[in-house]
Amino acid sequence: MTTAEYARLEERILARDQLGASQALYRLLEQGRPLTEITSETVRIHAPYTHVPYHQRLDDGVVKFVNNDHCLLSERVGLPLSSMVRPELALLPMAQTVWYMPTGLDPWNQLIGKAPGHYTRLYDITVNQTPPMPQAHWPDQAPEHVEGTLPEKLNQWLTLVQRGEVLASYRVFLGLMEDAPNRRAALAHLAFAGLIDVQDRMLHNRSYTTGHKAYRARATIELGETIGWDAAHHVLYAGVPDIAVGPRWYSTYEMGCNIVQNLLDGRDRDLLAQKEPLTAAEEALLIDAIVHQREPSVFAAVVALLKGGRSPRRILDTIQVAAAQVILDTGEPNNFSMAQHGYEYCNTLGWFYDTFEHPHRLKLLFVAASFINHGSEHQACTPGNGRRAITTPPGADALPPAALLTRLTGALLALRADEAVDLTAAYLKAGFDRAPLLRALAEAACIIGNDPHNQELGLCLLEDYRRSQAADRERLLLACAKHTAGHRKYGDPLECYRRFAEAFHLTER
């Protein structure tokens, strides 16, 4: 029975049938199938069909960007998000993933009008109403074992990635993963390969990497570890080939390398061992440099902090606060792309610091600072953005915490972003227990759907709030409210939730 239900799920997803796929999922959920099992099966279904041959097209002299790993990112976020919400909503993140998945297949053919989906609605492309089967642009491969020491093997793999040899690099990585004692080093290098691949400008660009390869690498690693590597080949197929797909951008990372070598004497190991936190004044100065000053001032500030003995990880906490401020300075829904991707890069880098002892992670601190500085410049030069005062809504200061959270949820689901920020600030100012606020923010991110990559941003901000030691870390919660209510929505953002609520007899919010 279960095999037949998964076959039905696959059939409906590949037919790009959102309603049918959701109904197949509901049957699996009603049977009590484990969430990890369902997650593994959904990765298996989409793994061949969410790759692209290249992340740009150049048609009629116009550069177009194509990148769609939102299925894999949504599956990663669904597992931790399910534990942050009320039990009756724990399965909703998976429902959001499956609702989106039929629109996320074969984005390359979507972009040229040969298939329906996310890019069809993004670029207003008319397509045939009878969709073709999605195309697998990169076939699966068997492992290839290369000779040499572990560092030599890792260098050989990364060289293949840099050269854009997609299938060769994938085969070599599969071989590295078969060396179980050294598997963790291979995974660290996979994440590193994603983190160094970031474009060197933003303003007036639409073709960019915005750190997506790092997010895809993280999703690959976390999903593979959850499922178990002995049963996770399809996870590697979903995540690894894309790391070598072009274009590849390493100039910002090269800048980080040169700063560490020329201004910090190449002392990565010593500087990474520093534990001293920043003072509140130092945090404020760094945030001001990132958000309001030119790039050289940002680098000078980070170098001075490192020379002064400050912890790289705590510097990253502060960069995250600056990234949250860029989200808060964003106005129009269509303007969130740079702000949200910048923040997710900082979140992923924090995860990388906390997960792996990679020798080159210090250099990535400068990539993150540059990323957010460029993002702030982009927002400042784009109409519809700007700093706004945070004020207490009328009557909010007299409400008890439960009533204030109810009002906040209403603002979030009604997409009143500024009001949601103001209500979050009022809750924080009143000194109420933070745990119910985090749950309310997580639930709103979970309920609002249609492109579940955006749920990930809500989770990133909540994750970092729990880990951050920055003096102004509560700014992350304000940014969470702003992003969840404010980012660009597609279709009806509550449709998936309403169908889920009806299927499982929940009281609609």
Image: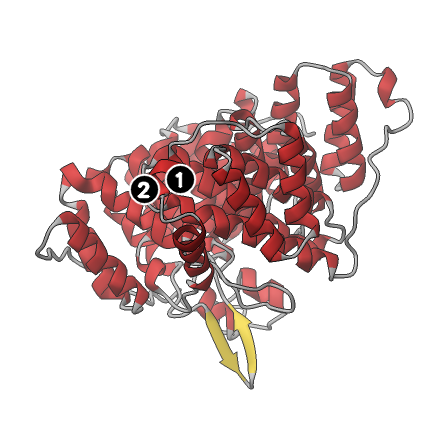
Residue at numbered disc 1: 352
Q: Is residue 138 left or right of residue 287?
A: left
Q: Residue at x 76, y 39 (%)?
A: 414
The quarter of the rendered structure image containing the N terminus is top left
Type of the residue with mark 2: His
**Label whose residue precedes the other's in the sequence (2 or 1):** 1
Q: SS at mark 1?
A: helix
Q: Nearer the viewer, residue 102 or 287?
A: 287
Q: Residue furthest left?
A: 147
Residue at numbered disc 2: 358
Asked whether disc 2 touches disc 1, contact meaning CB atoms under 8 Å apart, the reply is yes
Q: SS at mark 2?
A: loop
The quarter of the rendered structure image containing the C terminus is top right
Q: How is the image coloured?
A: secondary structure
Q: CA distance from mark 2 to mark 1?
A: 8 Å
Quadrant assignment, res 370: bottom right
Residue 104 pos. (x, y %): 48, 56
Q: Nearer the viewer, mark 2 or mark 1?
A: 2
Type of the residue with mark 1: Phe
Q: With respect to residue 17, does 458 lie above or below? A: above
Residue 77 pos. (x, y %): 47, 38
